């Protein structure tokens, strides 16, 4: 089970960090992938663009290879059981532990005029999303580790108080290492909100991709063989690893080691490989986004699948709590 908030555009970091893992999981596991539209209300109370954002995230997920016939691909707000479980879990989430959450402290700092209770209980809602399906594997990035730890805490607390209902959810990633997608400005990784020019979005058109790649920071190249690479050059090689052919990468590695690398050529190559990689995803996502009838069908079908599992869990939950009076 995993969720993506419909805020901001999906970028290469989301693709390699999350979407690609989802796609690999879908053939081996029973998967629930959700657009976290309720979570987005904690930081984005203005809903003018919500529908368009939800549709875009769904389209980009499907265009990246997620198959709505194989997984439950649904919107959080369509599953009313989530909000009920959220309420029960709120009774066993302590104010102190919620206030200590890193994401809460960050967001409270970012929006001091809107430190709402939903922001405080964000990890409770996320725990409800996960344990509603008794999910055990949650493909998420490092930034979500604390939330998952809290989901385990709430699940265990529930079990302890009312009897064993929930398994413990664990962070999951395919393969051993989390892929890092470096940003184009040589600092940090690609992200939704920071430097837009250093991040490549799945919706960027060919010209924009080329422009962004060509602007990446380089220098005049090494002057001695086998010089260690500066961070911003490591980043460019790192991006090549994601989209370029092995022999192409090898050539530039050798050029670097022999001090004959031409970064202009390297970036041109990277830009073209990036375009080749992203264009089909963008085109497919555009097609899907413009097909309202198809998207509606996807959402209905996803809600149907997710509801089945949600209803079963909630019957157990009410029984365990003692809310079954007749
Ligand atoms: N909090 C997650 C994020 O910001 C999104 C999310 C919501 C999520 N519900 C979830 C992730 C359940 C995993 C499982 O990225």
Image (cartoon, grey):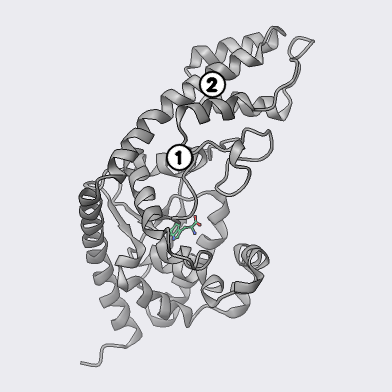
Residue to which mark 1 is pinned: 15
Residue 231 located left or right of residue 253: right
Q: Nearer the viewer, residue 50 or 234?
A: 50
Q: Secondary structure at mark 2?
A: helix
Q: Secondary structure at mark 1?
A: helix
Q: Which quadrant holds the N terminus?
A: bottom left
Residue 116 located left or right of residue 165: right
Residue 304 sits above or below residue 196 on the image: below
Residue 311 sits above or below residue 51 on the image: below
Q: Position of residue 152 (x, y in %)?
A: 48, 65
Residue 165 sits above or below residue 285 on the image: below
Q: Which quadrant holds the C terminus?
A: bottom left
Residue 274 sits above or below residue 65 on the image: above
Q: Is residue 71 visible?
A: yes
Q: Quadrant of residue 221?
A: top right
Q: Earlier in the sequence, mark 2 or mark 1?
A: 1
Q: Position of residue 214 (x, y in %)?
A: 61, 24
Per the model, the C-alpha gap separating discs 2 and 1 is 17 Å
Q: Position of residue 48 (x, y in %)?
A: 43, 62
Tag 2 and tag 1, C-beta contact below 8 Å: no
Look at discs 2 and 1 and give the one toward the viewer. Answer: 2
Q: Is residue 167 visible?
A: no
Residue drawn at x 45%, y 44% is 18
Q: Is mark 1 within 8 Å of ligand 1?
A: no
**How many other residues sit within 10 Å of disc 1, few (<14), some (14-19) or many (≥20)?**
some
Residue drawn at x 72%, y 22% is 229
Q: Nearer the viewer, residue 184 or 302?
A: 184
Numbered badge on residue 270: 2
Q: Nearer the viewer, residue 129 or 40?
A: 40
Q: Position of residue 304 (x, y in %)?
A: 21, 61
């Amino acid at each position: 089970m995993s969720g993506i908030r419909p805020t901001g555009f999906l970028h290469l970091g989301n693709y390699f960090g999350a979407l690609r893992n989802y796609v690999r999981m879908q053939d081996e596991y029973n998967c629930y992938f959700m657009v976290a539209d309720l979570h987005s209300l904690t930081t984005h109370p203005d809903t003018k663009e919500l529908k368009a954002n939800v549709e875009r995230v769904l389209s980009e997920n499907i265009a990246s290879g997620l198959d709505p016939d194989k997984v439950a691909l649904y919107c959080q707000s369509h599953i009313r059981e989530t909000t009920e479980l959220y309420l029960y879990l709120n009774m066993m989430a302590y104010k102190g532990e919620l206030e200590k959450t890193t994401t809460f402290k960050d967001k409270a700092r970012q929006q001091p005029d809107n430190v709402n209770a939903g922001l405080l209980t964000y990890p409770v809602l996320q725990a409800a999303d996960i344990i509603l399906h008794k999910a055990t594997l949650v493909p998420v990035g490092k930034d979500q580790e604390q939330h998952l730890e809290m989901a385990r805490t709430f699940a265990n607390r529930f079990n302890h108080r009312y009897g064993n209902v929930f398994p413990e959810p664990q962070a999951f990633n395919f393969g051993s290492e989390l892929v890092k997608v470096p940003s184009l400005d040589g600092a940090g990784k690609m992200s939704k909100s920071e430097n837009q020019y250093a991040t490549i979005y799945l919706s960027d058109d060919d010209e924009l991709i080329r422009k962004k790649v060509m602007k990446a920071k380089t220098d005049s190249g090494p002057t001695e063989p086998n010089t260690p690479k500066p961070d911003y050059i490591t980043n460019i090689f790192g991006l090549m690893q994601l989209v370029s052919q092995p022999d192409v990468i090898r050539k530039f590695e050798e050029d670097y080691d022999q001090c004959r690398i031409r970064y202009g050529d390297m970036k041109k190559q990277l830009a073209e490989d990036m375009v080749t990689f992203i264009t089909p995803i963008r085109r497919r996502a555009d097609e899907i986004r413009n097909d309202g009838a198809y998207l509606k069908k996807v959402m209905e079908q996803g809600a149907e699948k997710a509801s089945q599992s949600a209803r079963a869990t909630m019957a157990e939950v009410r029984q365990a709590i003692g809310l079954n009076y007749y």
